Image: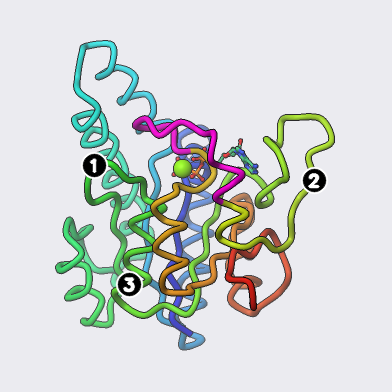
Amino acid sequence: MKVTLLIGGYVFDEVVQKGKMILDMYAKTILEADKRGHEIAVVAGGGKLARNYINLAKSLGASKSILDDVGILCTRVNAYLLISALGDRAYPYPPITYRDYVSAFLTGKIVVCGGMNPGQSTDAVAALISEYIGSDLMIKTTSTDGIYDKHPSEKGAKLIPRITYSQARRIIAEYSYDPGTYQLIDPIALKILERSNIPCRIVHGKDPKNILKAINGQDIGTLVCGELC
Ligand SMILES: Nc1ncnc2c1ncn2[C@@H]1O[C@H](COP(=O)(O)OP(=O)(O)OP(=O)(O)O)[C@@H](O)[C@H]1O
Ligand SMILES: [Mg+2]
């Protein structure tokens, strides 16, 4: 199976707070999936590193596109951490254009990138890479168990096991579109996934085994897909 794996900022925040163990576990899981014959394309998210730098640059008067650029650079730093953990099987650096990503992917190495362009988050990057390489599935690991019917911090929020692209879009409709604040999943990503009918499973990032479960089609987290999936 061809899979695009978007590793949300949660994992990189854990590394900063608690040390390398979680990234070692992620590398092991990705290498396991690779050994089982799956083709894994990887995108690293920004997490607190990106948000902290974005906030600093904002306080210094940077424009929104520059804030996105700052966030993108932080995602590439995170990508380098995972590349280091993957060792020889990894492509040695994060490609910075889609064209370069596809060329790197065709070498058969495991390619990890961060963000690409201002105006969109790594959610959209992962969705576009999924289109470019023809992924069967996108997996996003994040800081919650999936998509809830309202913000998970609100009382009574319920996890939604399966949701259509348009229903997901309705949930995020009110959310901010400012650099570093695309919450949950960005609307560009949903549009790209929808136009190419690529399913996306959102799972918690605390346990990388969730990635193998998602690849095996287990019903964990939230599956975002079309009406007929
Ligand atoms: N309806 C919802 N269901 C689930 N999570 C939601 C919802 N609404 C808002 N969120 C928030 O979205 C957050 C996940 O998105 P966020 O952009 O913070 O993380 P990420 O995309 O995994 O990481 P990063 O953007 O740093 O790469 C969750 O922590 C949660 O608080
Ligand atoms: Mg995000």
- Circle 2: residue type: Lys
Residue 195, position as x, y percentages in the image: 42, 69
Foreground pick, 195 / 86? 195
Query: Quarter of the image containing the C terminus?
Result: bottom right
SS under mark 1: loop
Residue 150 occupies quadrant: top right
Q: Is residue 87 above or below residue 94?
A: below
- N-terminal of the pair, mark 2 or mark 3, is 3
Q: Which residues are magenta?
A: 169-182
Mark 2 packing: few (<14 Cα in 10 Å), some, or many (20+)? some
Q: Is residue 191 above or below residue 182?
A: below
Mark 3 packing: few (<14 Cα in 10 Å), some, or many (20+)? many
Measure the C-alpha gap from mark 1 to mark 3. Answer: 25 Å
Residue 96, position as x, y percentages in the image: 17, 56
Measure the C-alpha gap from mark 2 to mark 1. Answer: 33 Å
Q: Nearer the viewer, mark 2 or mark 3?
A: 2
Q: Which mark is residue 118?
A: 1
